[in-house]
Amino acid sequence: MLRDLSPVIRWTLALALGVAVAWLAYGRAGASQRVLALVLAALRAAAVTLIAAMVFGASSAPATPLPPLVAIDVSASWLRAAGDDSAAVRTLRTLATDAASLSEHVVFVGDSLREATAREIATVTPSDGASHVRVAIDRAAALGRALVLLTDGELDDADALADAPQGSGVRVPARAAKRDAAVGELALPTSATAGDTLHVSTLVVAGGAGSSDGQLQLLLDGARVGAGAVAALAPYASTRVNIAFTVPRGARIALVQAVLRVAGDVELRNDTLSASLEIGDKPPAVFISTAPDLDVREALTVLRGALQLPTRAYLRLAPGVWREEGSLAPIREEDVRTRAAVAGMLILHGDTNWVPRTIARGARALWTPAPPTALARAGEVARTPEWYASSAPASPLVGALGGLPFDSLPPLTIAGPARGDFTVLAAKLGKMGDAVPAISGREAAGARTLIISGSGYAGWALRGGRSGEAFTALWGAIFDWLSVGRGDLRAARPVSSSVRAGEAIRWRRGGADSLVTVLLTRRWSGSTTTGANVDTIRLHFASTAFETSAAPMAAGVYDVRTNGGPSVLVVNPSREWVPRAPMVRDGPLSRGAFSSDAPRLSDTWWPFVLALLLLCAEWIGRRFAGLR
């Protein structure tokens, strides 16, 4: 607690303690000895005050603020709507040189923090793909110094400035607003089936001077497949443009590009945003439920969300009445059977005898829900048989399910033992007795099948916490294992169809290997190079994790090769090229001085000698007065 006290408070506490000790010793002296008592009390108070000040760590001289830590933002947003040797860059170099003269501690911040030399400051060209200042604030606090931040005002973590040390400030030079428009987001699925109609949503953002009317074009492997008008925008305003197109035939990994054409746009480096699209000749997954319930909803969330697997789902609401999940548009039962027959992965929930007459060789999940509990009659008490997941026996999925918190999972209702070649998940009635298979599987000639029994799995997801994570782990493992059976044999693939430079890249595991080697070949001018410019990265997946992250990469299109098949990774220019309103203004962040180099009393010799002399003088005075 003492380290948080100001020097004035430390000296005040020491003086109060010295006066209190002197009064206890001489406060009741008689009138005849009052003058002598006052002298002795003064000596006692001075000695005790000096000793207490040394114990409290009081300073012996006024505080002198230390030079600040100078942080220079070198993110690429300085160059937006300007050249690499523009007036903005020259202004940055001039201000950086002036700010560096305030202190010998100068650092660059952006996507990382590093020390800056005088030569680097004079020739700095901003190029970082992020604008993070939290690390600079933590460094200044650790050094006991104020922070002087030189930035263009566009920060990723501007709220961190609230924690800046006292005496800190921000310098934001004025910049001329220019007309600019950029493609900020491109939302589309990672894969699609030939013949599907995709609805692509694109976000267009304007710069500091707004933008004029324009057009957004959608290209598929360089061929135009759609376009949409873009209205004029006010400064830093945004709008969404939705474009629909039909996916052409031919299984491949295509490159989708959103290209913006706006008159008077001064920055061309943010007018294009790209993403990869895996096109297949058959639906990746078809989910059919003849008895829809909460389990269906939560399982679809994992299938589409966590795994990002495009799925068509159909629900039977009554005999002969079918609806498409989501839109609830009516569909004929014959059409449902036709689409299920060609699915690479088929999940059938409810009546497992409902299957197409002919079905493509692939993966299946046959899920039999538990029947509703019979109502209790008068005078009877009905109790639903509660089954509890107890273990994950040895199976191809045990690596992902071995760590489930079986002791804290909500109960299930089992429709009967799931008969298969191996048990995936076992359950016990009331946590007692012998375990029965709740989920089992079999594999024959490359075709994988899972048999799922019972209802109530959604209760795991609805409870949240560790139970919700267990639900995602269970169904993620199920769908991952089935996805291999539908032909996706890749050991790892990018989670997102596109990322930006400066962002960590997320990878999803497709097999059981926890260590995956990935070869990346960067394309040049739209063509794939061979034998050159090949980078190798190694991904490490935790035993129960299906995703991991890797370091950011430079902008470009990369062909990815792993065991099991290829994929494509698209790295777009960083978000620093997308216009956004400045987050901070020029001026001080707080008043006062955070740090000082004031010497402490205990660091010098004379306070000890003075305290000793004062105590000796008091002792001599007491003996002269005849006091003990």
Image (tube, rainbow, N blue to C red):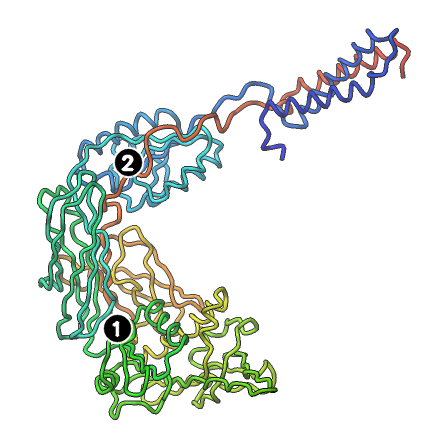
Residue type for callout 2: Asp
Q: Is residue 538 left or right of residue 560?
A: right
Q: Is residue 378 left or right of residue 544?
A: right
Identify the image quadrant of residue 446. bottom left
Q: Which residue is mark 2?
A: 152
Nearest-to-viewer mark from 2 and 1: 2
Residue 122 placed where, x, y %?
A: 27, 30
| Residue nearer the viewer, 238 or 471 | 238
Tag shown at residue 565: 1
The residue drawn where x is 23% and y is 65% is 568
Identify the image quadrant of residue 46. top right
Quadrant placement of the C terminus? top right
Tag shown at residue 311: none
Quadrant placement of the N terminus? top right
The residue drawn where x is 60% and y is 29% is 5
Residue 490 placed where, x, y %?
A: 30, 73
The residue drawn where x is 26% and y is 53% is 500
